[in-house]
Image: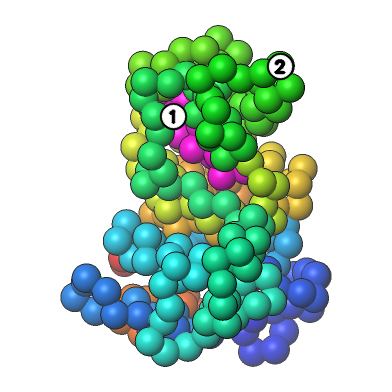
Amino acid sequence: MAEHQGNASSQLNVADSPLLEIRGLVKEYRALRPLRLKELVMRSGEVVSVVGVDAQAAEMLSTLVTGASLPEQGEVHLFGRSTASIGDTDAWLALLDGLGVVSDRVILLSQFSVRQNLAVPFTLDIETLDESMAARVDALAREAGIAPEFDDQLTGNVPAEVRARVRLGRALAFDPTLLIGEHPTATLPRECVEAFASTLAGMARARQLALLMLTSDEVFIRALGGTAVTLDPATGAWRSPRLWQKVADVFTRPVRI
């Protein structure tokens, strides 16, 4: 979580080593203005929702965090390492094991089952899963909140909520310590949003997983808990009078996005 005026970390009693540090970031992309972010620091177990980042900006921020893109200005450090310093593919892939991304951009194979789609991070041989692999992905499915009745159904035929949970399971495959969500409830039926948020919150507690959710979904943010803040896209600063606020504080005052 971001530090502000030297006292936020002591108030929040968080671990010393940040998982993610972004400082002075400016990135030009296909938008009216550059993506700007003055400061963001995330630590283990923190749950943070950022309001004010649209879908295009959320995608760009994810690519910057993963090191797939580099900023024109500023620095991004993931798990203590500058993304600009990653020199080879093996080092990059090893770094990404600690990061999961929940996004509708993750392609699901509609002609394969839910179980087979969850196996994709582990094996390319998904047409016939052996017993140990099936048990592994079934455990992942239960953690992601997928009912057993959907395991062998074609992914293209299951409800939108189940597909969202398949993407969540895929993001958890390599036991990440930081999970980024790009408007994770944008395609969910409204009646499913709270349950999805509850699953995420439970995972964060059980795994001491840090969640950085880029979202404008008030129902989701309230159900997820943690803290919420509004980003001013023009300046990259946090618009709120206090940098980090309780969720209730953000939504009891008008929020202009």
Q: Is residue 67 above or below residue 161?
A: below
How many tags in the picture?
2
**Looking at the image, which residue is at 53% across and 34% down?**
124
Q: Nearer the viewer, residue 190 or 17?
A: 17
Q: At which x and y percent is residue 119?
A: 57, 30
Residue at 41% across, 44% down: 106
Is residue 165 part of the magenta span, yes or no?
yes
Residue range corresponding to the magenta coloring: 159-172
Q: Quadrant of the N terminus?
A: bottom right
With respect to residue 171, does 123 lie above or below? Answer: above
Q: Is-magenta flag for residue 230?
A: no
Which residue in the protein does label 1 denote?
163
Q: Which x, y percent locates residue 23?
A: 53, 85
Are the two marked residues, 1 and 2, in contact with CB atoms closer than 8 angstroms? no
- Say few, some or many: other residues with alpha carbon within 10 Å of mark 1 (under 14 / 14 to 19 / 20 or more): many
Image quadrant for the C terminus? bottom left
For disc 2, the marked residue is 131
Residue placed at 65% from the left, 77% from the top? 81
- The percent position of residue 93, horizontal first and vertical second, equals 59, 60
